[in-house]
Amino acid sequence: MKKSIPEIKLNGESLTINDLYSVVYDSTPVKLSAASVVKVEKSRRYVEDLVKKEKIVYGVTTGFGEFASVGIKKQDAAMLQKNLIMSHAAGCGENYRPEFVRSAMLLRVNALAKGYSGITLKTLQTLIDLINHNITPMVPIHGSVGSSGDLAPLSHIVLAMLGMGEVLYKGKVIKAEAALRQAKIPAAELSYKEGLALINGTQMMCGIGALLVRRARELYLLANTAAALSTEALMGTPKAFDPLISMVRPHKGQLLTSKIMCSLIKGSGIVKSHTDCGEVQDAYSIRCIPQVHGAVYDAVKYVETVIDVEMNSATDNPLIFPDENEVISGGNFHGEPLAMAMDFLGIAAAELASISERRSDRLVNPNNSHRTLPAFLIKNGGLNSGFMIAQYTAASVVSENKVLAHPAVVDSIPTSANKEDFNSMGSISARKCIKIIENTEYALAIELLLACQGLDFRLPVKSSAKLMKVHSMVRKHITHMSEDRILSEDINKIVNLIKTPEFNELIESICKV
């Protein structure tokens, strides 16, 4: 009997990155918790009472942004919300990858599940149904300035709820109306506050960040592994990784990295083979791995704390507080915390790539490897160029990262007739980070490829049991290069390999300390 997939109950308080990952990649279904149902209904009743009493409430009985002073008649309430979605669906450019959109959809449901937004259960269920039926709206990447929420991207998501725009469904891009019909999901009909509740939030930025921060943690472990392999191939000394050094400068990331590096190299026959070689210290790209990789780890952990808070926050405007009899217009939609975090994560990932490229250069450059490795890691050099251009490629993506790592958050362009006069640009921070992470994957994959080639030249002397497991997995997909071949194919194979669950499970297991 097929094992049933457990549901994730959303309450707006306890969603984790692992939960999100499960929904996005494994299609784990979601539903509202019983407590959230009560909260959502209570908040909705409060909104409806305000309308009955003809209270002036931003976005409910008024227009939006600069039009906040324009009153809206009761009979126009539904049209106001639909117009909001259509007018704000102003994105352009290529579309976000489906996983980022699904992540944003889940986070929007979780935020609304807190019960501070005034949405109806029926409308909220439509968004849940889209998630559970794997109907993914097509969302252009350009349009958000990271304040007033991710208005344009989220509006494109809501378009699908209304049966408008296009979606990815069963592997094809089709009209949203057709997808809803096939899945037997009624199109949403928006009422007071609902359009605003659905789009006034940071979920596109946060959805991207939640997926990237998990990948960044995986890349940190991969970087340690590739660095250990490079250290072995270059016959570097592991003395610089001694935890005694880090204990007198006890940054958590540095301490952890020192322990991981020592664990990875423990029992290496290569280390034993050159214990008395006379070399005292290596270049910074080897010697300072605990300090550099450790700082990256600390940065990733900081970003995780920001994401964890944001994932379980109410970020729209105005917020409804029925118990306090308050409707408060504020700025929880402002993306500043995420913008800073995403810029920081991009900088951290760029540093992993940058130091990795320096180790790749040492592997191919005979002047840096003390000529104990053949030039460009190939025999019969001259006729063969070996891995010469692989280092060029690493240098290329690292150089691009240096441009992308410039923080977007330090910029701001006013919008909405200067009513919104300071914007976070967090969506740009998040989008840049996507590319930086991709480039870092390329750089680390190239180092891993070169380090395994270098390790081949140390045989029959072997590295540690842990590192030889990694070497063996790489060699299952890519053979030793004894003469020139198309390197692009090897690089693509190893990039695909480092994205597989099997590979990442291996790396995580050998890096446990």
Image (cartoon, rainbow, N blue to C red):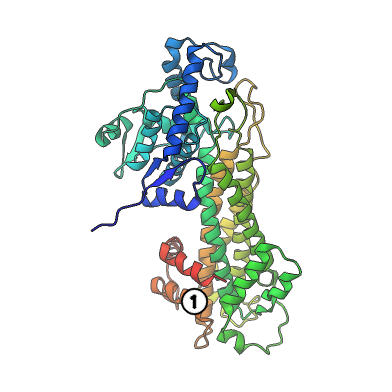
| Residue 156 in the image, given as x and y percentages of width and height | 43, 32
Asked whether, in this view, residue 428 is left or right of residue 165, the answer is right
| Residue 158 in the image, given as x and y percentages of width and height | 42, 30
Q: Quadrant of the N terminus?
A: bottom left
| Residue 106 in the image, given as x and y percentages of width and height | 44, 41
Q: Residue at x 47, y 41 (%)?
A: 11
For label 1, the crowd category at 10 Å Cα-Cα, with few meaning under 14, some 14 to 19 and many 20 or more, is few
Among all residues in the image, which is located at the extreme front?
323
Q: Residue at x 44, y 32 (%)?
A: 38
Among all residues in the image, which is located at the extreme left?
1
Residue 140 seen: no
The number of discs equals: 1
Residue 124 seen: yes
The one nearer the camera, 16 or 184, is: 16
Q: Which three-letter amino acid code belongs to the residue tagged 1?
A: Leu
The one nearer the camera, 38 or 12, is: 38
- Above or below, 165 against 468 in this view is above
- Above or below, 364 against 344 in this view is below
Q: Which residue is mark 1?
A: 383
Q: Secondary structure at mark 1?
A: loop
Q: Quadrant of the C terminus?
A: bottom right
Quadrant of the rendered structure where residue 358 is? bottom right
Q: Residue at x 65, y 76 (%)?
A: 367
Asked whether, in this view, residue 419 is left or right of residue 446, the answer is right
- Above or below, 337 against 49 in this view is below
| Residue 74 in the image, given as x and y percentages of width and height | 45, 11
Among all residues in the image, which is located at the extreme right?
248
The one nearer the camera, 416 or 264, is: 264
